[in-house]
Image: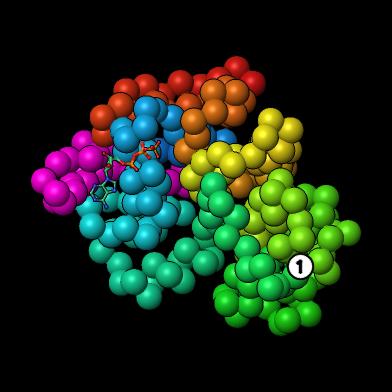
């Protein structure tokens, strides 16, 4: 099984207000196309871990490898380019720009990457919107969409550069049951059809139960990793 992410011996400390160790020797690997949930009680270190995996936080001990590239010790410029090319992010809140249309929001990360012409980017953005069933809303201001629709658009935006890994921090935390199901199904399809990897921090037991594997954390430690029969 091809590994797309290797986290080795992560230790992470916070020093304010007092020094404490938030991650303790966290080591795990993630397969290509795997749909992984990270669960655990509030404050156990899930978001801190995801932030390290996202390459946004570089203050840690240990090594991070994604797509065969060692990312520990790289410059901010290198990491920023790497993120835009290889990673997609979905958060609890959609962070769409309200004065931009749905289509423009989805296009933004690809325009920033500068790999495709504007025409190509627009075409790609349409394709992503089609995939999530939102192409009819392409010209609407994103602020005019429902919460569930906005989160779907945020996923399309995360997918625009065809990332190897999509990372989600409570991606359904702000959604009702129906929209949670829709978002879950999109992730499932991405993993199954496109072999893109999903790593999602979640508090939702039903969401976690549908993932391929669940990593459970407690007090900065991985206490279990089990595969679901899905
Ligand atoms: N910048 C920071 N400085 C100091 N302590 C922090 C910082 N960020 C988080 N913490 C602490 O680190 C611990 C882990 O936080 P983290 O947000 O990773 O937990 P979590 O498992 O994601 O929680 P939740 O499920 O509530 O989001 C908590 O005790 C939190 O208060």
Q: Give the range drawn in magenta.
A: 1-27
Residue 96: give x, y in percent of width and height.
Answer: 62, 63
Is residue 4 within the magenta segment? yes
Q: Which residue is drawn at 25% across and 63% down?
A: 73
Q: Is residue 48 left or right of residue 31?
A: left
Q: Which of 109 and 115 is in front in this view?
A: 109
Residue 212: give x, y in percent of width and height.
Answer: 57, 28
Is the CB of mark 1 within 8 Å of ligand 1? no
Q: Quadrant of residue 105?
A: bottom right
Q: Label 1, on which residue?
A: 141
Q: Residue at x 34, y 51 (%)?
A: 52
Residue 123 appears in view: yes
Q: Is mark 1 on a helix, strand or loop?
A: loop
Q: Which of 197 and 218 is in front in this view?
A: 218
Residue 176: give x, y in percent of width and height.
Answer: 67, 35
Q: In this view, does 21 lie to the left or right of 30?
A: left
Residue 23: give x, y in percent of width and height.
Answer: 24, 39
Label 1 CA crowd tier, 10 Å (few <14, some 14–19, many 20+): some
Q: In which quarter of the image is ligand 1?
A: top left
Residue 165 appears in view: no
Residue placed furthest toward the top: 229
Is residue 42 within the magenta segment? no
Q: Main secondary structure of the magenta part?
A: strand
Q: Nearer the viewer, residue 144 or 221?
A: 144
Q: In which quarter of the image is residue 57?
A: bottom left
Question: On the rendered image, what quadrant is the C terminus found in?
Answer: top right
């Amino acid at each position: 099984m091809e590994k797309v992410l290797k986290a080795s011996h992560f230790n992470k400390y916070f020093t304010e207000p007092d020094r404490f160790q938030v991650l303790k020797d966290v080591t795990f690997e993630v397969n290509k196309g795997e749909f992984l949930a990270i669960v655990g009680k509030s404050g156990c270190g899930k978001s801190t871990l995801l932030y390290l995996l996202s390459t946004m936080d570089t203050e840690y001990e240990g090594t991070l490898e994604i797509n065969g590239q060692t990312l520990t010790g790289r410059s901010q410029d290198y990491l920023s380019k790497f993120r835009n090319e290889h990673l997609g992010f979905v958060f609890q809140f959609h962070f769409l720009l309200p004065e931009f249309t749905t289509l423009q929001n989805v296009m933004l990360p690809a325009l920033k990457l500068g790999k495709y012409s504007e025409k190509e980017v627009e075409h790609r953005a349409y394709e992503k919107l089609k995939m999530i069933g939102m192409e009819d809303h392409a010209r609407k201001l994103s602020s005019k969409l429902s919460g569930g629709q906005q989160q779907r658009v945020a996923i399309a935006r995360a997918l625009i550069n065809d990332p190897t890994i999509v990372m989600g921090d409570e991606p359904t935390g702000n959604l009702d049951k129906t929209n949670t199901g829709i978002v879950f199904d999109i992730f499932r399809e991405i993993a199954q059809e496109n072999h893109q990897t999903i790593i999602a921090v979640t508090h939702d037991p039903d969401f976690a139960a549908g993932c391929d594997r669940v990593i459970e954390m407690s007090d900065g430690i991985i206490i279990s990793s089990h595969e679901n029969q899905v």
